[in-house]
Amino acid sequence: MKKWIARTVIILLAVLLFIGIIPFEKEISYYATDYEFALDRDGAVAPHEVRIAGKYYTSFLLKDRFWGTFYVSDVEGLTEEMTVNFAFEPTDCFYPVFLGEAGQPHSTEIAMIVFEKNFEQLAMMFTTKYERHGDNLTTAFSDSESNFLVLGAANKKEALTQYSRMLEEKR
């Protein structure tokens, strides 16, 4: 009888572990023109064409992943054909590292991404400094002076409300 209970417990644990690591997949497809706003200025700074398309994988025990294209027009370091493979904790702020054609880390003007699971809500904070001097690149950002973009926000007030809420939830 004890062997049967032990086997049952082992089988149940194996099944739970298996279920915990199996990723669930969701197709992501977002195409729109969204506006960049500045914390220290009124009105929109610039419109950006945003295209995010790919697969978002989530599981109970592993980090979430996104595989696909992540493009924002007029952002230094991003190209339309760039494919990304992000691994992240959806409960944290994400500091993206994009990969170049040969797989080398590649900086962009996107300093941080905050989002809700499956990218239901997503905001980006841009660098306040992005300078190239030959092979050297200098980037910096500041929470108090940053420019940001929130997907689907109709105006600065709505964008700032969503951006602040998402940042507060992540910190």
Image: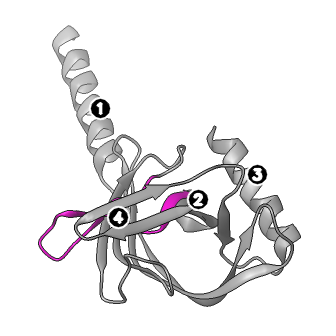
Q: Nearer the viewer, mark 1 or mark 4?
A: 4
Q: CA distance from mark 2 to mark 1?
A: 34 Å
Question: At label 1, which amino acid type do we have?
Answer: Leu
The local crowd at label 4, few if under 14, some if 14 to 19, many if 20 or more residues have their Cα within 10 Å, is some
Viewer-nearest of discs 3 and 1 = 3
- Residue at 33%, 37% (x, y): give it: 16
Kindly state the secondary structure of the residue where label 2 is placed. Answer: strand
- Secondary structure beneath dot 1 equals helix
CB under 8 Å between discs 4 and 2:
no
Q: Residue 83, image x and y in percent? A: 29, 78
Query: Which residue is labeled 3 in the image?
Result: 165
Front position in the image: 129 or 159:
129
How far apart marks 3 and 4 lie (CA) works out to 26 Å
Observer-nearest of 83 and 90 = 83
Q: Tell me which label, 2 or 1, sits earlier in the chain.
A: 1
Please state which of the two labelled residues, at mark 3 or mark 4, is closer to the viewer.
Answer: 4
Q: Which residues are magenta?
A: 95-115
Where 133 falls versus 93 (above or below)? below
Q: Earlier in the sequence, mark 1 or mark 4?
A: 1
Give the CA distance from mark 4 to mark 2: 20 Å
Disc 2 or 3, which lies upstream in sequence? 2
**What is the residue that sits farthest to the left in this orientation?**
102
| Amino acid type at image mark 3 | Arg
Q: Is residue 12 above or below residue 101?
A: above
Badge 1 is on which residue?
12
